[in-house]
Image: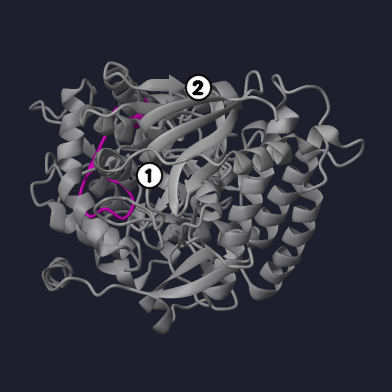
C-alpha cells in the first residue's frame, strides 16, 4: 500500500471560509489543538462573494429593529420550514458576533454619528445589513484570518478530503490528498467540523467558484449523517449574463438596496406586476415610494426589487420566457437612473458599490453609472445540508459537526440576503465551541487501515485505465443536465428524466480515465469531485420530486401552489442499508409558545 503521513489534532475543521475560520478560532480559544484544511488557498473562500453585508439587528439606522423582527423576517422568508431554535439563536446572537468582528479589526462603513452603517436588503423589514461598501465578505475573511492565525491553529492549504474515517459509529478523522503533489495524508481528530460551503458547481450557471462541489454534503452523507432540505437551492436573481466568459458572476443585491431597479427590454419596471400577498402591506405600489424607502424614509414601503430572492428570480425568468428579456437572455438592472434623483449620482454609486463598478468596467466594458447591467438568475446558495442540532451544530453522527452553507436548518425554504454571513459567524462559533467540548470529553479513535486502502485504490483507479471518458466531459454533461432539468422551474417529467440521466452519469463516472501523474493534475481532481457532485445532484432531484408543491426557492410548475400538508414537514435524506438513497418526512417541531407570540406580534 502506498505510504501516507498521519497528523493528530483535537479538532479538525474542513473549510476555511467564514464558518470554518470562526469555528477554528473558537475551538482554539477553548485550548484544544486545531487543524484547518482548505481545498484552495487560505482567503479564497465563497464568503468573499457575499458583498452586500451581514444581517444583524443592531438598530443603528432604525431603532425599531430588534431580534424579534429579525427572527420573524427569517421565519417568514423560510416559509416557516426553518428550525425555529436556530432562527432564534441567530437573531439574538448576530449583533454580538458583528461587534466582536469589529473589535477584531473589521472596518465597517459608518453612520454620521460613528455607528456601524446598515443598509436595506430583500426580505428584511428594516435596514439591517452592516457592510463595507460591497466588499463585506472580503473584509470578514481578512479580519477572521488575521485574528485566527495568531491563535496557534495549523493550516493545510490545497488539500482535498476524500472520505471521513469512522471508528464504530463515530467520526475519528479524515483521509485525503494534497492537490499540489498528489500525496495522501490521514488526519486523526477527536472532532471534525465540516464548513465546506455549497454545491453550485453541480450547475452550468453559478456564482460559485470551482471548489464548491458539495464536498461536505457528500462526505457527511456517505458517513451516515442525515441531510435536510436538499430541494431548497437558491438561485440568486442577479448574476452577470454578458459576455459569456463572466456568465453567472454575482451582482450583489446591494445594487437594488441602493436604489437599482429591474427593467425588461421595453423599459418597463416589471416587478410591480407580481407582489405576493404575504408582502403586499410592506411593498411600495409606486416608484416614488420605493425610492424614498432606499433613501431611508421610515414611513415608505420597500420597492418590489427587494422582495425575496426566489420571487425576484422567478419574475425575471417570466420576463425572459415571454420574450421581454435583454438581448443576451437576461433583464436590465439599472442603478444609473438615480442621476435623475441626485446630482452627484456617479460618485455615490462608485462609493457605495466600488466592486460592482470595477467588475462591470473591467469584465464587460460597462459603466454602471451611465448604463444598465444585463443580469439573470445564477445558482448561488444551498439552504439544504447536513442536519445538525441547533445548539451544538453536531450532526446525527457523533463527532461530526457542520456550520455555514453545508449545514441546514436556519434558512428553511429560502434564505434572506445577508443572513449567510451572520449564520456563519453565529453557528461557526457554536460548532467550534461544542467540537472543542466534545474533543475534551473523548479520546482519539482507531483508524481503520483497510478503509484507507480501499479509498486509496478507488482514488487511483482512473490512472490505471487504458481507455475511458474525460472527467471534464462528464462534469460538463452533469452541469448542463441539472441546469436544464432541475433548475429554477421544475416539473415531474423533467426530474424523472434527470433521475435516469444521473444513473447513466454515475456509470460513466466509474469509468473516467486520467493521464499524466498525480502532481498538479486537474483531470484527476475533477474525477474525484464527480462522486460529490453526483451525490448532491441525486439528493436535490429526489427531494424536489418528493415535495409536490411550490414553496420558497422550490418551484414546481405542475404544483404551482403551496400545499398545507407539505408545510408540516422537512425532508430528510439518508443512506439506506443497501447503499441506496432514502427519503423520509420529518414533522416540524412545534414552535415554542413564546416564539409563536413573537411571530404574531411582529405580523
Question: Magenta segment, principal secondary structure?
Answer: loop
- Residue extending furthest toward the bottom: 565
Residue 491: which quarter of the image? bottom right
Relative vertical location of residue 51 with respect to residue 55 in this rendering, above or below: above
Q: Which mark is residue 23?
A: none
Q: Quadrant of the N terminus?
A: top right
- State the residue position of label 1: 404
Relative vertical location of residue 233 with respect to residue 442 in this rendering, above or below: below
Q: Which residues are magenta?
A: 120-138
- State the residue position of label 2: 157
Q: Nearer the viewer, residue 104 or 454?
A: 454
Alpha-carbon neighbours of circle 2 within 10 Å: few (<14), some, or many (≥20)? some
Q: Secondary structure at mark 1?
A: helix
Q: Are marks 1 and 2 in contact (CB under 8 Å)?
A: no
Residue 442 drawn at (x, y percent): 30, 43
Relative vertical location of residue 408 with respect to residue 96 in this rendering, above or below: below
Q: Residue at x 12, y 51 (%)?
A: 66
Amino acid at each position: 500500500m502506498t505510504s501516507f503521513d498521519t497528523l493528530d489534532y483535537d479538532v479538525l475543521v474542513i473549510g476555511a471560509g467564514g464558518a470554518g475560520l470562526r469555528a477554528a478560532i473558537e475551538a482554539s480559544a477553548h485550548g484544544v489543538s486545531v487543524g484547518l484544511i482548505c481545498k484552495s488557498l487560505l482567503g479564497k473562500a465563497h464568503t468573499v462573494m457575499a458583498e452586500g453585508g451581514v444581517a444583524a439587528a443592531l438598530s443603528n439606522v432604525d431603532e425599531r429593529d430588534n431580534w424579534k423582527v429579525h427572527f420573524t423576517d427569517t421565519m417568514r422568508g423560510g416559509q416557516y420550514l426553518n428550525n425555529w431554535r436556530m432562527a432564534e439563536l441567530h437573531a439574538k446572537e448576530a449583533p454580538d458576533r458583528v461587534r466582536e468582528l469589529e473589535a477584531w479589526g473589521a472596518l465597517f462603513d459608518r453612520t454620521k454619528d460613528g455607528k456601524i452603517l446598515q443598509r436595506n436588503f430583500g426580505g428584511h423589514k428594516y435596514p439591517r445589513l452592516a457592510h463595507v461598501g460591497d466588499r463585506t465578505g472580503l473584509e470578514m475573511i481578512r479580519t477572521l484570518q488575521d485574528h485566527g492565525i495568531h491563535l496557534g491553529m495549523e493550516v493545510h492549504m490545497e488539500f482535498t478530503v476524500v472520505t471521513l474515517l469512522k471508528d464504530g459509529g463515530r467520526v475519528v478523522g479524515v483521509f485525503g490528498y494534497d492537490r499540489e503533489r498528489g500525496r495522501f495524508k490521514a488526519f486523526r481528530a477527536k472532532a471534525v467540523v465540516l464548513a465546506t460551503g455549497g454545491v453550485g458547481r453541480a450547475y452550468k450557471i453559478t456564482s460559485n467558484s470551482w471548489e464548491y462541489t458539495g464536498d461536505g454534503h457528500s462526505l457527511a452523507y456517505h458517513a451516515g449523517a442525515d441531510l435536510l432540505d436538499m430541494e431548497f437551492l437558491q438561485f440568486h436573481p442577479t448574476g452577470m449574463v454578458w459576455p459569456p466568459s463572466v456568465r453567472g458572476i454575482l451582482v450583489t443585491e446591494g445594487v437594488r438596496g441602493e436604489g437599482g431597479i429591474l427593467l425588461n427590454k421595453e423599459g418597463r419596471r416589471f416587478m410591480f406586476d407580481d407582489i405576493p400577498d404575504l408582502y403586499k402591506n410592506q411593498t411600495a405600489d409606486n416608484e416614488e415610494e420605493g425610492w424614498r424607502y432606499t433613501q431611508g424614509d421610515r414611513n415608505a414601503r420597500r420597492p418590489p426589487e427587494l422582495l425575496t430572492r426566489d420571487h425576484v428570480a422567478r419574475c425575471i425568468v417570466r420576463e425572459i420566457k415571454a420574450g421581454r428579456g435583454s438581448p443576451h437572455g437576461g433583464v436590465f438592472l439599472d442603478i444609473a437612473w438615480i442621476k435623475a434623483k441626485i446630482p452627484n449620482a456617479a460618485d455615490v454609486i462608485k462609493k457605495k458599490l466600488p466592486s460592482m463598478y470595477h467588475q462591470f468596467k473591467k469584465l464587460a466594458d460597462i459603466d454602471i453609472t451611465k448604463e444598465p447591467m444585463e443580469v439573470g438568475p445564477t445558482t448561488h446558495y444551498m439552504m439544504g445540508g447536513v442536519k445538525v442540532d441547533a445548539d451544538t451544530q453536531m450532526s446525527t453522527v457523533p463527532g461530526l459537526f457542520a456550520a455555514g452553507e453545508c449545514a441546514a436548518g436556519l434558512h428553511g425554504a429560502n434564505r434572506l440576503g445577508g443572513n449567510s454571513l451572520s449564520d456563519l459567524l453565529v453557528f461557526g462559533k457554536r460548532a467550534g465551541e461544542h467540537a472543542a467540548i466534545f474533543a475534551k470529553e473523548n479520546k482519539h479513535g482507531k483508524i481503520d487501515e483497510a478503509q484507507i486502502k480501499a479509498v486509496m485504490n478507488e482514488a487511483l483507479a482512473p490512472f490505471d485505465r487504458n481507455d475511458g471518458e474525460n472527467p471534464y466531459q462528464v462534469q460538463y454533461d452533469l452541469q448542463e443536465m441539472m441546469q436544464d432539468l432541475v433548475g429554477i422551474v421544475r416539473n415531474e417529467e423533467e426530474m424523472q428524466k434527470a433521475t435516469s440521466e444521473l444513473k447513466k452519469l454515475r456509470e460513466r463516472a466509474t469509468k473516467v480515465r486520467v493521464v499524466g501523474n498525480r502532481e498538479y493534475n486537474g483531470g484527476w481532481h475533477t474525477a474525484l469531485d464527480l462522486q460529490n457532485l453526483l451525490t448532491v445532484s441525486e439528493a436535490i432531484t429526489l427531494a424536489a420530486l418528493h415535495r409536490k408543491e411550490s414553496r420558497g426557492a422550490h418551484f414546481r410548475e405542475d404544483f404551482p401552489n403551496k400545499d398545507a400538508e407539505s408545510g408540516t414537514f422537512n425532508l430528510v435524506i439518508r443512506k439506506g442499508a443497501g447503499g441506496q438513497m432514502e427519503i423520509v418526512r420529518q414533522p416540524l417541531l412545534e414552535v415554542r409558545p413564546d416564539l409563536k407570540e413573537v411571530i404574531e406580534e411582529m405580523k
